Image (cartoon, coloured by chain):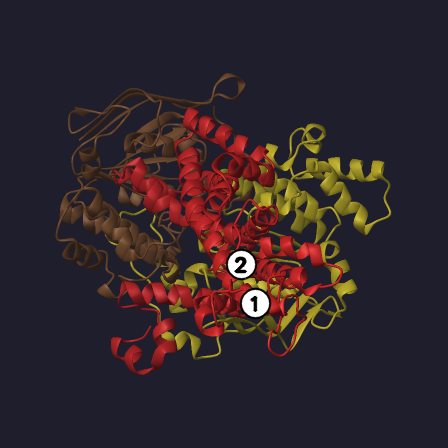
Chain colours: A yellow, B red, C brown
Amino acid sequence: MAKPLLSVENLSVSFDTPKGVVEAVRGISFEVGQERLGIVGESGSGKSQTGRAILGVTPGRVSADRIEFDGIDLRNAPARVMRDIRGQRISMIMQDPRYSLNPVMAVGWQIAEAYRVHTDASKREAKQRTLDMLATVRIREPEKVFDLYPHQVSGGMGQRIMIAMMLIPGPDLIIADEPTSALDVTVQLQVLAILDDMVRDRGMGLIFISHDLHLVSSFCDRILVMYGGQIMEVLEADALEKAEHPYTRGLLNCLPDLDHRQDVLPVLERDANWLLTNGASE
Amino acid sequence: MSSPSESTDAGLKAWLLSDTPHSVTQARCQRLYLAWLAFAANPIAMLGLAIIVILVLMAAAAPLLTGGDGTEQALANRLQPPNGEHWFGTDELGRDIFDRIIWGARITLYIVGLVGIIVVPIGLLVGTVAGYVGGWVDIVLMRVTDIFLAFPRLILALAFVAVLGPGLENAVLAIALTTWSPFARIARAETLTIRNAEHILAARVQGASTARIILHHVTPLCLSSVIVRLTLDMAGIILTAAGLGFLGLGAQPPLPEWGAMISTGRQYMLDQWWVATIPGIAILVVSMGFNLLGDGLRDVLDPRSGGSS
Amino acid sequence: MITVENLDIAFGSGRGRVHAVRQVSFKVARGESFGLVGESGSGKSTVLRAIAGLTPGWRGAMAVDGVALGQKRARDFHRRLQMVFQDPYGSLHPRHTVNDILKEPLIIHKVDDIEFRVLKALDEVGLGAGYRFRFPHQLSGGQRQRIAIARALILDPEVILLDEPTSALDVSVQAEILNLLAQLRRERNLTYIMVSHDLAIVAHLCGRIAVMNRGAFVEEMSGDQLRAGTPEHGYTRQLLLASKGYDRAAIDQFVEFD
């Protein structure tokens, strides 16, 4: 791999609760290049906190030996630099777009606004760019959708609009946190296809955070499997069947299989030893 | 997770934070304890709580703190400024103002307590029934609520007292009648957000009657926002009561009601400032106490502003 | 056991009218497990809720064990038919302990031996007495769904309606819940109607499957037929293809079905 876009070393995130400190992420290291990296794990595995810690938007305490994006140290970057990076160079796509969109502003202008914040484009230029972008994310009637308000769009359309908004400044890295879990399977795949094309055509990096091991393995180039805040295993996506770690194997086996009849599904047995070793790293 | 033996010897704190409560009591105490931790972390709210606790203690210990019942006259000592013997001075009939403030605390608590007891059940009942049943029931109940909401509080209270005659009980009744409507609105709004929640549907699938769902399932969830609102409204209730007292329509002499005390002190305002000022300060401090407490409670109880689990 | 004939449900009126369910008919035998699959807005949950008596204003005919259902349900109906909801975080009352939650149906139906039954129900869903006095926020998603299942079983019903019972759970927990549901059905000869958007789950738990799109049945088939990958309708085939994961080339072939 060429020089990575983002490299993270020994990242930890912890939270203070009335019952003591909870460690959500425990010293993980990984790198992302111009590729589709999947981070897979169940709830509480720390996968979402990892994505948020990179952008500095977690309420927890973050510590790391290194979070470096394109030569910039994100750990100690001043707020102004971080603001410029967030949105313009690294974008984040959340699970439910309807919470992230302003309910009283037409979606088109929200996208145009996102463009104008980072460029000196005129309103007219921004609108044109927005319409192009809406077409790129395969919205059929961009002119019509431009003037809709968030409550008037469906979930799948909302997620496409969100993606358009995140892509319009031309970021180098996209962090997508369960971007399609709320959508129907066919719509989900169509939205992923848009992200996929962007990564390929524009040479972006993509961190795709999901609980769905099958989906991630069919979509991404590389997979980090997380459990208990640590990386259990790093896999090439097409080598999923060769996964060795018992956790990965357990996750794979406990899914009902569409091809074979099973009376009882194998149940994942967790092992405390998984967390004692320092996990896998690159 | 702790084994049963652990929680007995590891002390109260472990008992309160244990993941496996062994009784209903322990489960409820844990809930209160966590809420208390969140509440105690807010110094302003604690100040409010302290003021209210002191007020309650003052009212409870009134006979111990004072010589009489706050109505003994001593005309030889009238209108004395604050001094070592009469900390807050004396009024135009030579009554000790400190004593009267303390006895007045009982009246204030009596008023807010009684208003709360009347207003919360009425508001909850009207609001939850309107919100849950819906349809024409909702329309009728809410229009009635609107009518009460549209009247200026003090004016309507004045009208009630004019009809029923002046006196503390009538003042309480008048205040209650003008106070319940916002509670009904809050309870209704809260009910509308939860009436289609899955746990309410689950209760319906179990065959629970409408009355049971409203009482056991909807009301507990409305209670916290209603209590928060009540605490925040306490200041207004105290002020209305004091206003009625000031106008001579609330507590009647010689009862040491703070508003009535200001009213009589008014005549001596320029030369004997303490007669009107001291009860004014008492009203201010107690109103503020309730407001601070209400803000703190809202942070702990209201799920929308975060805080609770 | 359950017969649904020409079920038709519409919400709203005028331009805002949504025709949620169109002329749906099916029969489920005693002890059978029937699955309804579809995407969001297909009307699958609405059918389930209509059977449970949660959706007023339906037209058509429904019967449970030969007894026709009216718009309002008698209390006895609920002893025979119970439901498990999708969201384990929303289907348990946040201010009630597990004990209160499990006691509630027993109190409503005036069943005695409450203590014994609550402990037995907890035991049956694989949770011990140690969970009895917890609040829902002290439970994981899987544990909550076990409580919801225990609540549905505590009245010894014959029919259980399952509304996406595992869609909010992690896959490893999903496997445990699916196993529990299969085991309970075997032990008690329960009749299930399960709604899901996930073909693999429905194929796993249900012997017979109906695919729904825009309020109507697209086709009905057996679980084996689905596993063999031989559905007849194009909509089902597309759904099946989509369930197998991301395939860039296949996605461009997706079409909308009416």
Number of other residues with Cα within 10 Å of mark 1, as a class: few under 14, some 14 to 19, many 20 or more: some
- Decide which of B51, C198 is in the foreground and name it: B51
Can you identify the residue that label 1 sits on? Answer: B74
Q: CA distance from mark 2 to mark 1?
A: 15 Å
Question: Looking at the image, which is closer to me, B256 or A4?
Answer: B256
Amino acid type at circle 2 is: Pro
Q: Nearer the viewer, residue C149 or A131?
A: C149
Can residue A178 be seen in this snapshot? Answer: no
Mark 1 residue element: loop
Q: Is residue C44 above or below residue A238?
A: above
Q: Quadrant of residue C3?
A: top left
Q: Position of residue A29 (x, y in %)?
A: 58, 72
Quarter holding the N terminus of chain B?
Answer: bottom left
Does residue C17 lie above or below A35 as drawn?
above
State which quadrant residue C243 falls in.
top left
Badges 2 and 1, same chain: yes
Q: Is residue B71 above or below residue B232?
A: below
Residue positioned most to the top: C14
The residue tagged 2 is B256
Q: Is residue A257 left or right of residue B36?
A: left
Left or right of C136? Residue A57 is right
The answer for which chain carries disc 1 is B
Residue C226: image x %, image y %? 32, 37
Q: Is residue A72 visible?
A: yes
Task: Give the numbered dot on residue A246.
Answer: none
**B89 with respect to C174 (left or right):** right
In which chain is the residue bearing label 2? B
Identify the residue at horizontal 49%, vertical 43% (top origin).
B183
Crowd class of label 2 (few under 14; some 14 to 19; many from 20; radius 10 Å):
many
Residue C21 at x, y = what percent? 39, 24
